[in-house]
Image: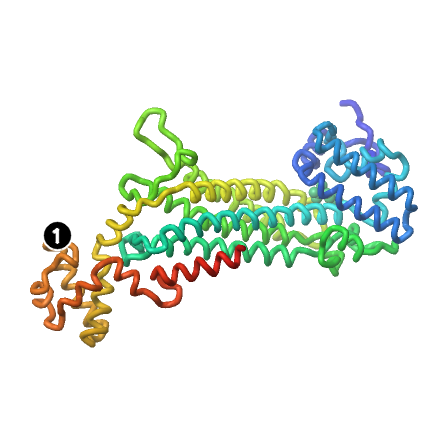
């Protein structure tokens, strides 16, 4: 095998170039080129700071900053040739800058290392993703609010154990997801606020003897402050893990909702119809309309959980400070971010386009003795019965209705009084599903007035 020359960026002490396998396992350019814009933004801020602190001349810094813009436009235009021999995005950009501007390019790396550089680039990338997820979550929540508003008082069965429990309103069910995605939104914002410290200037691990201005680079890059410990700054990937854990919880919510849409759109439920735009047909069964988008959301979530576990595992045994293991952080996060954004967009589209089947929801709301609790509550309230006794009396009535294959409101007053004499005609007022939901006016309850109050609150939050 021909002897390759050593690496032009760090090969001073090397007599021979790397083995092809070494190059293959070592290079990250195949994926970290996704951080090109962040890398160049970081380098431009660093160059400006090197001039402001007189570490390099103004004219050198200007050449670097201009040259870096040229590199960026080449990458964006797709006519940049990425080199595996140059390992990663940092050295690819710097080597090209050298070709463009010559000697001053060699001064760019003064007072920094690829360790603080990659931490900065990756943070900027994750920060952009947090902002994108923030926007996508808000869009989804707005679609849910629209659904909630149009059916704030539509009745449907509420379930526990997926068995009919009590009637609830469609608006209430939609707003439950608004709460869930609202917590996701606040997790994303917490993570963003906590991660917004700039690693640049931590250099390899110990800081630098050059009189750099870390406040300046932090400010230029939109960070709140420089990170306070250089060892921590280059070895911290908490920001990526917080992104992945917030993403995992959000993904879990998406998957639960996807599961409900799969169930609800089945012929057995018919609670919703999904639009043609978010369904597919079967190549053999002409009648089929499948909820593929919901199923794929449900499935894709596994990759996001997987990324979280994978990065936790990469990080868990690493001594301070940087280790090359940490190069394995990016692909996981890129893949999780892509799939989370896709899942959020698909869910938003499905929710926006779906129509709730009001008659099916209402028919199902009254089935399965869903107002039995209302009957028991009435016995407590009107007949002053202890709840446990009321529960027992109601259970007897349910058994009677079940035996007669009718619903509770179909029992006659005489039949009911044969179980307990305190029951009067008024009982029928609480056995209807609309009365049932209207009566649940406790804060956060399913009554349409409560649901409308929550819709109004969230509209204000998201305005
Ligand atoms: N490509 C590397 C990474 O993603 C950049 C940092 C390399 N640092 C080093 N000391 N070799 O982690």
Q: Position of residue 393 (x, y in %)?
A: 16, 68
Q: Residue at x 87, y 39 (%)?
A: 63
Nearest the eye: 445 or 292: 445
Q: Quadrant of residue 261?
A: top left
Q: Position of residue 379 (x, y in %)?
A: 19, 71
Q: Position of residue 412 (x, y in %)?
A: 9, 61
Q: Quadrant of the C terminus?
A: bottom right
Q: Secondary structure at mark 1?
A: loop
From the viewer's perspective, tell me whether residue 288 is left or right of residue 463: left
Nearest the eye: 78 or 451: 451
Other-residue count near label 1 (Cα within 10 Å), few / some / many at <14 / 14–19 / ≥20? few
From the viewer's perspective, tell me whether residue 196 is left or right of residue 456: right
Q: Is residue 207 visible?
A: yes
The residue sitting at the bottom extreme is 384
Label 1 within 8 A of ligand 1 by Cβ: no
Q: How many numbered discs?
A: 1
Q: Quadrant of residue 167?
A: bottom left
Q: Is residue 210 above or below residue 24?
A: below
Nearest the eye: 322 or 394: 394
Answer with the quadrant where ligand 1 appears in the image: top right
From the viewer's perspective, tell me whether residue 25 is left or right of residue 338: right
| Residue on which disc 1 sits | 405
Q: Is residue 321 visible?
A: no
């Amino acid at each position: 095998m021909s002897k390759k020359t050593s690496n032009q960026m760090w090969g001073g002490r090397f007599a021979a170039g790397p083995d092809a396998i070494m190059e293959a396992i070592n290079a990250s350019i195949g994926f970290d080129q996704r951080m090109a814009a962040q890398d160049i933004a970081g380098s431009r801020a660093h160059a400006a700071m090197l001039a402001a602190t007189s570490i390099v001349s103004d004219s050198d810094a200007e050449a670097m900053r201009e040259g870096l813009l040229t590199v960026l436009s080449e990458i964006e235009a797709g006519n940049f040739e990425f080199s595996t021999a140059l390992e990663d995005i940092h050295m690819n950009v710097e080597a090209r800058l050298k070709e463009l501007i010559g000697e001053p390019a060699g001064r760019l790396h003064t007072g920094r290392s690829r360790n603080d550089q990659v931490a900065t680039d990756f943070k900027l990338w994750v920060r952009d993703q947090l902002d994108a997820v923030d926007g996508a979550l808000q869009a989804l929540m707005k679609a849910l609010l629209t659904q909630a508003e149009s059916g704030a008082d539509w009745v449907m069965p509420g379930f526990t154990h997926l068995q009919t429990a009590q009637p609830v309103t469609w608006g209430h069910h939609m707003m439950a997801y608004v709460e869930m995605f609202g917590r996701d939104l606040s997790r994303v914002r917490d993570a963003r606020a906590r991660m917004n410290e700039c690693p640049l200037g931590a250099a390899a691990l110990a800081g630098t003897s050059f009189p750099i201005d870390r406040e300046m680079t932090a400010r230029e890059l939109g960070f709140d402050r420089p990170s306070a410990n250089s060892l921590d700054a280059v070895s911290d990937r908490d920001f990526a893990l917080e992104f992945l854990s917030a993403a995992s919880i959000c993904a879990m919510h998406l998957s639960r909702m996807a599961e409900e849409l799969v169930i609800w759109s089945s012929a057995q439920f018919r609670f919703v119809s999904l639009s043609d735009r978010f369904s597919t047909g079967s190549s053999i069964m002409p009648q089929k309309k499948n909820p593929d988008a919901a199923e794929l959301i449900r499935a894709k979530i596994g990759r996001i959980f997987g990324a979280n576990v994978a990065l936790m595992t990469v990080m868990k045994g690493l001594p301070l400070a940087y280790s090359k293991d940490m190069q394995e952080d990016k692909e996981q996060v890129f893949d999780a971010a892509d799939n989370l954004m896709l899942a959020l967009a698909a869910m938003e589209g499905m929710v926006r386009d779906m129509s709730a089947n009001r008659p099916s929801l209402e028919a199902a709301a009254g089935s399965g003795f869903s107002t039995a609790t209302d009957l028991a509550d009435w016995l407590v309230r009107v007949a002053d019965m202890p709840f446990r006794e009321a529960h027992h009396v109601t259970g007897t009535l349910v058994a009677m209705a079940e035996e007669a294959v009718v619903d509770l409101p179909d029992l006659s007053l005489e039949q009911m009084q044969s179980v307990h004499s305190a029951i009067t005609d008024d009982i029928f007022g609480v056995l209807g599903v609309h009365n049932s939901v209207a009566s649940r006016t406790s804060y956060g309850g399913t009554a349409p007035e409560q649901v409308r109050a929550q819709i109004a609150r969230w509209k204000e939050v998201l305005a």
